[in-house]
Image (cartoon, rainbow, N blue to C red):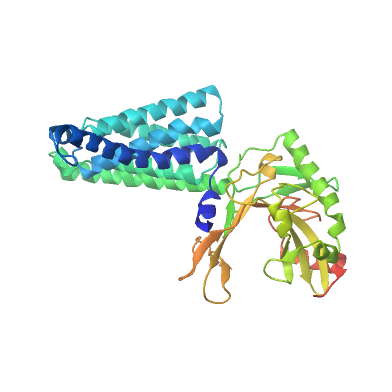
Amino acid sequence: MNALRAFAAGIAPEHVPALVAGVLYPVGLVAARRLAARTRAARTGLSGDAGPAAVATAPASLAVRLAAVLLGTSAAVHLALPLGHHDDARTTVAFLASGVAYGLLAYRAGRGRRWRLPAALLVLATLVAYLVVLGTGGEEPDQVGLATALAELVVLGLCLVPDPESTRRGRAVRGLGAAGFAALVVVFGATTWVQSFAAHAATGTVAGTDGHDHGHAARAQAGVVMAPVGTGHPTPAQQRAAAELAARTRAGLARFTDIRAALADGYRPTLSRTGLDVHLENKAYGRDRRVLDPEHPEVLMYAIADGRATLLSAVYQLPDATRAAPTPGGPLTRWHSHNVCLTPLPPGISVVDSYGGCPTLSVTITSAPMMHVWVVDDPGGPFADSAPERWTRPFNLAHGVDFHW
């Protein structure tokens, strides 16, 4: 279940139908081939794939068979995208047209017909279109989009680096094809990385409950997985909705200003009991399936240090990573997850390193999506992911209530 949550945390909800289609296609292909082989065997009295028909339609090489499967998988993904995207008619037609084109090329490759040149042109057009969408803020890279792009890059590599027996100038052609493919991979990977990093930059401002504007920066720190969301500036309606959520959260959490009230209501520390970002979880509220409920937030965050405790924020949390997160404030109300490492060695848990890896003999798990809504004047605004210690500690000393465990 943790592995499923870890994978699902980076998937845009609108891409779930495409993911399902992409996974089911190779499974269905294997099942269909086995059924066809059994039917043929029953008719001819032969077993397996033997027979003139099978030999006549067998792909020329393992590389071509791989290309056929990947082209078919990409076709299934593109044909299923309109089921979740609900875009305008032009985008829907583009998805369907590319899906049909990938399907036809998969069929041609599977039948041993010419496919490389049209497949290379289609893949290039698809990848360029994907980069344009990322660059214009239409969406952010997620696991489905990147996995599909990776499959299409492999197809492109198979197009540019043909089989040795397919050309007399094999060595020169393969060398140029390999160099061109490597350059394309570098350009595409670097561009996607830049777009993903830029998507985590500041996307606008929202008026705080004190009447001032706060800049909001959604940072992608080590161990933090930002949920995909549009990267454009928030609309006036989204700014109003974000400000309303912040105000309702501040009002709903007023009764928990004294940490003893939160403890009496069933909140308990999740990990540490002291520090400047102590999380108190209410398991009953986490199971009630209510989302963005200021009266019943799943987690509260306190600064508990120097003999004082200050309520800092609500931490709204989804029950699991497979549920779509509401974003009333658009890019302002952005959810995130945490990648953590579980290890048998002390202390048993840690965050991933700056490269997203875990220590040896440990496993990575991803928390359910969460979103902070601050009830104090955090320097980063009401939806910041964190606050600097140099601000939190003196604020706690000045405003916290006396408290000791």
Q: Can residue 156 be seen in this view?
A: no
Q: Can residue 223 be seen in this view?
A: yes
Question: Which residue is nearer to you in this view: 390 or 31?
Answer: 31
Question: Measured along the vertical axis of the image, is residue 273 above or below residue 107?
Answer: below
Tell whether 336 sits left or right of 341.
right
Question: Which residue is nearer to you in this view: 375 or 183?
Answer: 375
Instruction: Residue 89: give x, y in percent of width and height.
Output: 53, 22
Tell whether 279 sits left or right of 340.
right
Which residue sits at x=87%, y=57%?
255
Residue, far bottom: 346
Which residue sits at x=53%, y=58%?
2
Question: Which residue is nearer to you in this view: 237 or 339?
Answer: 339
Tell whether 387 sits left or right of 72.
right
Question: Which residue is nearer to you in this view: 280 or 156?
Answer: 280
Instruction: Residue 196: give x, y in percent of width and height.
Output: 53, 47
Instruction: Residue 253: give x, y in percent of width and height.
Output: 83, 54
Q: In which quarter of the image is the C terminus?
A: bottom right
Question: Measured along the vertical axis of the image, is residue 64 above or below residue 281?
Answer: above
Instruction: Residue 377: give x, y in percent of width and height.
Output: 81, 55
Which residue sits at x=85%, y=63%?
261
Name the image quarter holding residue 22. top left
Q: Count the numbered circles shown.
A: 0
